[in-house]
Image (cartoon, grey):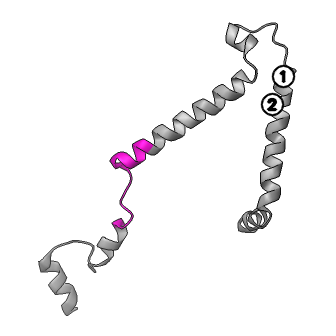
Amino acid sequence: MNTIIEYLRDRLNTVIKTCYGILALVLAYSLYVDKSHAHTWVEQNVPFFWSLFGFGAAAIIIGVAYWYGHSGIMARKDFYDEESKSCCGCSGAKHESSCEQA
């Protein structure tokens, strides 16, 4: 798996151009979709509606997840550094002095 990731990182410009090409194909295909059975006015008259709707929904989900993660649910970056300072996994002066003696 790591070799695949390294291979793609080495060819980043090709990966980006391929993604843009796929996006262009999806957008071009959405122009030819039969809209005669559309349920709403928006589906019938706004080009790329479902593509834009999906992109907007994904952006909102990512934004909410980012906010929720940074609002306190995520652990601090130095979370494990503080615990590794004491040898017995607990914090207290009584235990630290006994760790130094051992």
Q: Amino acid at mark 2?
A: Leu
In this rendering, the answer to whether 38 lies above or below 91 is above
Point 82% across, 37% down: residue: 24
In this rendering, the answer to whether 40 lies above or below 93 is above
Query: Is residue 40 among what the camera can see?
Result: no
How far apart marks 2 and 1 lie (CA) works out to 7 Å
Horizontal side of 71 relative to 62 (left or right) equals: left
Q: Amino acid at mark 1?
A: Leu
Q: Residue 100 placed where, x, y %?
A: 21, 90
In the rendered structure, find residue 31 and report the number of the disc placed on it.
1
Indicate whether residue 39 is drawn in magenta.
Answer: no
Residue under label 2? 27
Name the magenta segment's main secondary structure. helix
Query: Is residue 68 among what the camera can see?
Result: yes
Q: Residue 37 placed where, x, y %?
A: 79, 7
In this rendering, the answer to whether 70 lies above or below 12 is above
Answer whether labels 2 and 1 touch (C-beta < 8 Å). yes
For label 2, the crowd category at 10 Å Cα-Cα, with few meaning under 14, some 14 to 19 and many 20 or more, is some
Q: Which residues are magenta?
A: 67-79
Horizontal side of 63 relative to 57 (left or right) equals: left
Count the marks: 2
Q: Residue furthest front?
A: 46
Helix, strand or loop at label 1? It is helix
Quadrant of the rendered image containing residue 50: top right
Helix, strand or loop at label 2? It is helix
Q: Residue 46 placed where, x, y %?
A: 72, 17
Indicate whether residue 72 is drawn in magenta.
Answer: yes
Point 23% across, 71% down: residue: 90
What is the quadrant of the N terminus in the image? bottom right
Quadrant of the rendered image containing residue 39: top right
